[in-house]
Amino acid sequence: MTRTSPIRVLVAKPGLDGHDRGAKIIARALRDAGMEVIYTGLRQTSEMIVSAAIQEDVDCIGLSILSGAHNVIVPRITALLREQHAEDILLVLGGTIPDEDAARMKESGVAAIFGPGTPLETTIDFIRTHIKPRGLLTT
């Protein structure tokens, strides 16, 4: 099967974290890999992120969190996705997530966590192979 539309990814910086270099690097890498990328900018609320993801009809949400607020933000985002019947959107997390929090993040609905130094191709390949099928034609 061949996908008829590009993968759409929302890259978001939730909370008060003002460091967006990593988010911008991943947004550019995803774009260069042929994906459509929507970058929300800094200081987004969970509600703003989920609303944008639904409005933009994305396949994946990529959260970049360096502030340590992931234990509050991620469960809120996954709850909002469930409320909106949008839990089929792939959710990935990048940033400095302590090992002891990783299991809780995955239990909350995060498909993968990409820490500092993760090769860009690893993230790109993961998104390509884990998004839910849509916009497909049989060949």
Image (cartoon, helix red, strand yellow):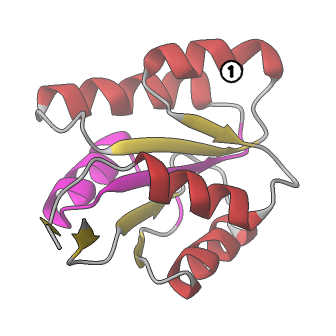
**Mark 1 crowdedness (10 Å alpha carbons): few <14, some 14-19, many ≥20:** some
- 40 lies above or below 64: below
Q: Quadrant of residue 20?
A: bottom right
Report if residue 106 is visible in the image.
Answer: yes
- 48 lies above or below 67: below
For image coordinates 51% across by 48% down, the residue present is 14
Viewer-side residue, 115 vs 17: 115
- In screen coordinates, is 91 left or right of 125? left
The magenta-colored residue range is 42-67
- 62 lies above or below 92: below
Residue 59 rendering spot, x and y as whole percentages: 30, 56
- In screen coordinates, is 100 left or right of 38? right
Viewer-side residue, 45 vs 108: 108
For image coordinates 43% across by 46% down, the residue present is 130
For image coordinates 34% across by 28% down, the residue present is 78
Residue 12 rendering spot, x and y as whole percentages: 48, 58
Report if residue 19 is visible in the image.
Answer: no
Q: What element carries label 1?
A: helix
Name the amino acid, label 1: Ala
- 120 lies above or below 129: below
Which quarter shows the C terminus?
Answer: bottom left
- Residue that badge 1 annotates: 102
Quick check: is 50 in the magenta stretch?
yes
For image coordinates 51% across by 23% down, the residue present is 72
Which quarter shows the N terminus?
Answer: bottom left
